[in-house]
Amino acid sequence: MTGPERSIRIRAWRDGDAGRIVEAAGGLSTQSLFGRFGVGTASLPRAYIQMIEQHSADDRVLIVVALDGEQVIGWAESWPDATGDVELAVVIVDAWQRRGVGAGLVRFLLGEAAAGERRVNAYVLGENSAAHRLVRAVVADRLEASRSDQYVHYSLAA
Ligand SMILES: CC(C)(COP(=O)(O)OP(=O)(O)OC[C@H]1O[C@@H](n2cnc3c(N)ncnc32)[C@H](O)[C@@H]1OP(=O)(O)O)[C@@H](O)C(=O)NCCC(=O)NCCS
């Protein structure tokens, strides 16, 4: 697997990124939004934007963004859950999918999460072949997978 193109930068969240991801969301198809949020929606859910705005400065929340110039083209997050583990999610705008950006973001995020020595979980819809392939491409060797309802639960020791 190759990394993202050289013009792409990946960095940790900064003030002002909430506006950048709202702009970036204009480049997400309903299929991509469904893959990320598991619900049919034509735009970023309002509750999600509020959650990002309220918690992006929380040390336990990691958010990393990929940029082409000053434009966000994808982002990945890990949020603490009730058990002390973290849950990972990622989304790339449609025009930038299949160009190594998702894998680059997840690798960067896992590097940061490893510092906390927590187990990382991801819940992927069974039909979401792009996300299954991404998970396996990045961390196949350290992965446990189990299936429940329509989701596959991946769990990774940090
Ligand atoms: C899943 C997603 C993040 C992948 O990001 P991406 O930048 O396109 O992925 P990459 O280019 O880094 O590719 C990573 C691996 O997945 C594979 N892949 C990516 N898209 C694929 C697709 N549509 N079908 C099959 N394989 C795919 C790549 O070939 C690569 O595998 P390889 O190294 O074995 O060749 C992107 O499709 C997306 O944003 N989907 C909508 C949101 C979502 O479903 N998020 C996941 C749940 S939180």
Image (spheres, rainbow, N blue to C red):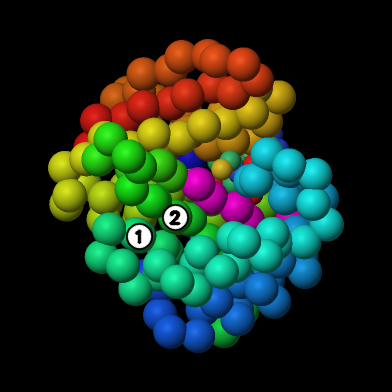
- Name the quadrant of the C terminus: top left
Q: Can residue 66 be seen by looking at this rendering?
A: no
The amino acid type found where label 2 is placed reads Glu
Near mark 1 (Cα within 10 A), the count class, few <14, some 14-19 or many ≥20, is: many
Disc on res. 77: 2
Relative to 29, 84 lies left or right: left
Q: Can residue 143 be seen by looking at this rendering?
A: yes
Q: From which residue to which does the magenta span run? A: 89-96
x, y percent for residue 122:
46, 35
How many numbered tags mark residues here? 2
The image quadrant where one finds ligand 1 is: top right
Does the magenta run of residues contain 108? no
In the picture of the structure, the residue carrying the numbered disc 1 is 62
The amino acid type found where label 1 is placed reads Leu
x, y percent for residue 128:
67, 30
Q: CA distance from mark 2 to mark 1?
A: 6 Å
State the residue at coordinates (28%, 35%): 83
Which of the two residues, 137 or 25, is positioned nearer the viewer here?
A: 25
Q: Secondary structure at mark 2?
A: strand
Marks 2 and 1 close (CB-CB < 8 Å): yes
Question: In which quarter of the view is residue 130 placed?
Answer: top right
Does the magenta run of residues contain 90? yes
